[in-house]
Image (cartoon, helix red, strand yellow):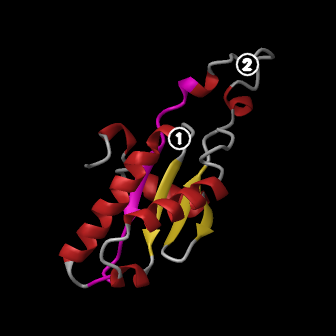
């Protein structure tokens, strides 16, 4: 199942911004690049009273997946891995803080594995917690 359109990172500029300014977290199969949203204090620096629903006003977290031919020369394999990652991220969507821009980069040794979605789920969840996208501040 693909990610809903509201959660997809699409434009080249967004990917470049995440790579240029985002924080990096590593695991054995992935690198996560995460770009924090502007904090509510930056959004309302002139006002003293910050509304309680500022987090709801942030856009949805946008997610992109980067998988190079170093993972596998075969597009079938790369697309299968991408679908597994998308399925895992789909399960994690309700836990994500709003406003983030994320890029999941698949490391080359991931192509050796066939179907390990439970391991993918654990690794991605740990990376998202480490980057404070889950249980963090938005």
Q: Nearer the viewer, residue 26 or 34?
A: 26
> Residue 95 bears which disc, if any?
1
State the extent of the magenta-drawn residues as a range.
Answer: 56-72
24 vs 60: above or below: below
Q: Position of residue 79 (x, y in %)?
A: 24, 68
Q: Answer whether residue 65 is magenta in the image.
A: yes
Residue 61 in view of the camera:
yes
Image coordinates for residue 51, horizontal then vertical, percent: 69, 16
Identify residue for label 2: 50
Residue 102: image location, x then y, percent: 50, 54
CA–CA distance in space, label 2 to label 1: 24 Å
| Furthest residue in direction front, as rendered | 118
Asked if 6 appears above or below 63 in the picture, the reply is above
Q: How many marks?
A: 2
Task: Judge the density around disc 1: few (<14), some (14-19), many (≥20) Cα neighbours within 10 Å.
Answer: few
The furthest residue to the right: 48
Q: Is residue 137 magenta?
A: no
- Residue 67 against residue 54 in the figure, above or below: below
């Amino acid at each position: 199942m693909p990610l809903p359109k509201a959660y997809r990172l699409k434009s080249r500029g967004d990917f470049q911004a995440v790579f240029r300014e985002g924080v990096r977290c590593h695991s054995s199969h992935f690198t996560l690049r995460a770009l924090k949203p502007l904090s509510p204090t930056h959004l309302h620096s002139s006002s003293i009273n910050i509304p309680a629903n500022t987090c709801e006003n942030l856009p949805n977290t946008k997610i992109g997946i980067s998988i190079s031919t170093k993972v596998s020369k075969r597009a079938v394999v790369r697309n299968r891995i991408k679908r597994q990652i998308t399925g895992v991220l789909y399960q994690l969507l309700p836990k994500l803080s709003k406003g983030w821009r994320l890029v999941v980069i698949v490391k080359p040794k991931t192509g050796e594995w066939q179907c390990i979605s439970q391991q993918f789920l654990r690794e991605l969840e740990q990376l998202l917690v480490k980057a404070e996208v889950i249980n963090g501040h938005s």
